[in-house]
Image: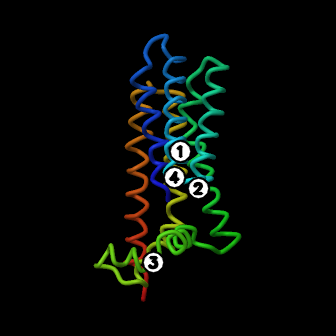
């Protein structure tokens, strides 16, 4: 996974919160878009063309455009949930239709399982493969739950409560997915 994708979720939200206030939504949205464009430029300069980063920025720009057009920051607030739901859908499609564990495939392709084992000396190669395989099934559930809660918070709660649901909630969903995957592996017969 590209670390720039995490930044696309965090930094524009921080700028949005810092610049926004009563009657300042347009300024906050333009600030978030400008920071997203700077992040995209940096990502392209450092890592080259990365389709995930480019598509994440494009989705953010479309949702910011919708917020500006409708004079409602709700659309910006749900862009992360939309990308997370799309990611969960792709992971489930890969699992159900293609019989692929996306996280395991990504680890093998981009990092190498041997490197990951070296970074986690407490796990052997088979344990790590099993963990990534099960995590590829559990993570979409937690991402979907987080996305639905984020959409609810965006519509019904204040911008600060939404930000607390969205940002720390994303990391909580990742931790819960890892924990549930570890429990499933520990409870399975060998």
Q: Which residue matches tag 1?
A: 147
Of residues 62 and 170, which is closer to you in this image?
Answer: 62
Mark 2 and mark 1 residues within 8 Å of each other at the beta carbon: yes
Query: How many angstroms separate mark 4 from mark 3 (CA)?
Result: 24 Å
Q: Pointer 4: residues within 10 angstroms few (<14), some, or many (20+)?
A: many
Whole-angstrom CA distance, mark 2 to mark 1, is 10 Å
Q: CA distance from mark 1 to mark 4?
A: 6 Å
Disc 2: CA contacts within 10 A as few (<14), some (14-19) or many (>=20): many
Residue where numbered disc 3 is placed:
113
SS type, badge 3: helix
> Residue drawn 45% across and 48% down?
6
User: Residue 88 bears which disc, if any?
Assistant: 2
Sequence-wise first label, 2 or 1: 2
The relative height of residue 36 versus residue 85 in the rendered view (above or below) is: above
Q: Which is more N-terminal, label 3 or label 2?
A: 2
At a point 52% along the width and 68% down the height, the residue shown is 103
Which tag, 2 or 4, sits closer to the chain's start?
2
In contact (CB < 8 Å): disc 2 and disc 4: yes
Protein image colouring: rainbow
Q: Are marks 1 and 3 in contact (CB under 8 Å)?
A: no
Q: Mark 4 sits on what residue? A: 143
């Amino acid at each position: 996974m590209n670390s720039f994708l995490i930044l696309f979720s965090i930094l524009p939200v921080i700028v949005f919160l810092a610049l926004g206030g009563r009657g300042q939504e347009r300024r906050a949205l333009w600030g978030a878009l400008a920071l997203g464009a700077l992040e995209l430029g940096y990502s392209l300069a450092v890592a080259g063309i990365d389709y995930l980063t480019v598509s994440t920025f494009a989705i953010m720009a479309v949702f910011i455009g919708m917020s500006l057009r409708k004079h409602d920051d709700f659309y910006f607030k749900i862009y992360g949930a939309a990308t997370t739901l799309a990611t969960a859908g792709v992971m489930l499609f890969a699992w159900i239709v293609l019989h692929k564990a996306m996280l395991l495939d990504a680890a093998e392709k981009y990092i190498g399982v041997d490197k990951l084992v070296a970074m986690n000396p407490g796990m052997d190669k088979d344990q790590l493969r099993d963990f990534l395989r099960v995590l590829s099934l559990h993570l979409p559930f937690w991402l979907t739950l987080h996305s639905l809660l984020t959409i609810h918070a965006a519509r019904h709660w204040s911008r600060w409560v939404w930000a607390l649901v969205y940002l720390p909630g994303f990391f909580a969903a990742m931790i819960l997915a890892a924990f549930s995957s570890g429990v499933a592996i520990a409870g399975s017969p060998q």
